């Protein structure tokens, strides 16, 4: 099952028109490039600080990322990385036929760890990442694995999708160092349907080794909008990874008495 999510301009939220080699805002005339069929819809406001730093890093290592992770994780941790991925992905609450948004999809490896009762061929998959290098590797992986997915190069803080579109939204890895974590969380909530489940997961302070940090890594629990339902925080692999799950509220129906 493969459909393309309608794209909106990250600057004015007008709908975009996909063409052969470009994406066009017919209202303003603004154009965006397509790189190997991947729309590049980065917002200038968020391409600074950590976002700029890590997009450059992952553009550079994107082609070799999977191999390096496989070798290093196997030597250092055995099967623990795979087991942790499987545990985390089980919290997405994805159902067959869902429209899903995978924020920071990277090379797409997480899709191999969805629950066994989810038929990937029934999903409408959209994956976004700030690194075009990782997305190009992801595109190759999708073809190799026979998975249909729409890939978009954008900032998590400015998602190019309409409100209330996705049945499930999830992010694994990266939010610890986003330029604006609050904006990214608000965007994930905005594009999720009412009643949708949202998951945010990343490494904890015990595993992060970034000497440039000015403050400790903490799960962004306080940034979850207060109106969200069923907010929960879990940790995995002896506290090395955290996982926040919550649900966007259903619309309230008024009962009229006569």
Image (cartoon, rainbow, N blue to C red):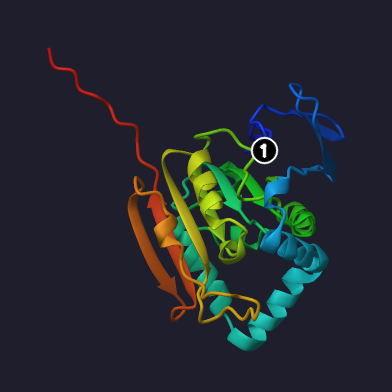
Q: Residue furthest right?
A: 21
Residue that sits furthest to the top in the current view: 258
Q: Residue at x 42, y 53 (%)?
A: 224
Q: Is residue 212 left or right of residue 222?
A: right
Quarter containing the N terminus: top right
How many marks can you see? 1
Label 1 crowd (10 A; few <14 / some 14-19 / many >=20): many
Query: Nearest the camera: 212 or 245?
Result: 212
What residue do we see at 67% from left, 35% from top?
Answer: 4
Kindly identify the residue that appears in the image at 58 percent across and 33 percent down.
162
Q: In the image, residue 235 lies at what x, y percent?
A: 42, 72
Q: Kindly tell me whether residue 11 is visible in this rendering.
A: yes
Give the image location of residue 86, x and y in percent.
51, 67
Seen at 47% across and 70% down, the residue is 218
- Up the image or down, 77 lies above or below 151; here it is below
The residue indicated by pointer 1 is 10
Quarter of the image containing the C terminus?
A: top left
Would you identify the image quadrant in which residue 257 lies? top left
> Would residue 97 be seen by someone viewing this image from the given angle?
no
For residue 148, above or below residue 52? above
Toward the left, the furthest residue is 258
Q: Position of residue 9 (x, y in %)?
A: 69, 34
Q: Secondary structure at mark 1?
A: loop
Residue 87's spot in the image, x, y percent?
Answer: 47, 67
> Could you tell whether 2 is left or right of 226 in the image?
right
């Amino acid at each position: 099952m493969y459909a393309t999510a309608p794209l909106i301009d990250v600057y004015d939220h007008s709908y975009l028109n996909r063409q052969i080699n470009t994406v066009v805002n017919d209202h303003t005339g603004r154009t965006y490039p397509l790189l190997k069929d991947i729309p590049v819809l980065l917002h200038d406001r968020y391409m600074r600080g950590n976002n700029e730093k890590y997009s450059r890093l992952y553009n550079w290592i994107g082609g070799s990322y999977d191999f390096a992770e496989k070798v290093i994780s196997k030597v250092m941790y055995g099967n623990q990385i795979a087991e942790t991925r499987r545990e985390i992905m089980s919290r997405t609450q994805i159902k067959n036929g869902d429209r899903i948004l995978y924020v920071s999809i990277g090379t797409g490896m997480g899709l191999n760890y969805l629950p066994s009762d989810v038929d990937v061929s029934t999903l409408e998959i959209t994956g976004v990442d700030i690194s075009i290098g990782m997305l190009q590797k992801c595109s190759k992986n999708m073809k190799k694995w026979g998975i249909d997915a729409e890939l978009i190069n954008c900032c998590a803080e400015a998602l190019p999708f309409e409100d209330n579109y996705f049945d499930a939204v999830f992010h694994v890895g990266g939010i610890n160092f986003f330029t604006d974590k609050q904006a990214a969380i608000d965007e994930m909530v905005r594009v999720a349907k009412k009643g949708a489940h949202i998951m945010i997961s990343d490494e904890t302070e015990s595993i992060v080794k970034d000497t440039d940090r000015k403050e400790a890594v903490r799960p962004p629990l306080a940034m979850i909008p207060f109106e969200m339902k069923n907010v929960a925080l879990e940790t995995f692999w002896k506290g090395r990874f955290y996982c926040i799950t919550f649900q966007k509220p259903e619309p309230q129906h008024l009962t009229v008495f006569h």
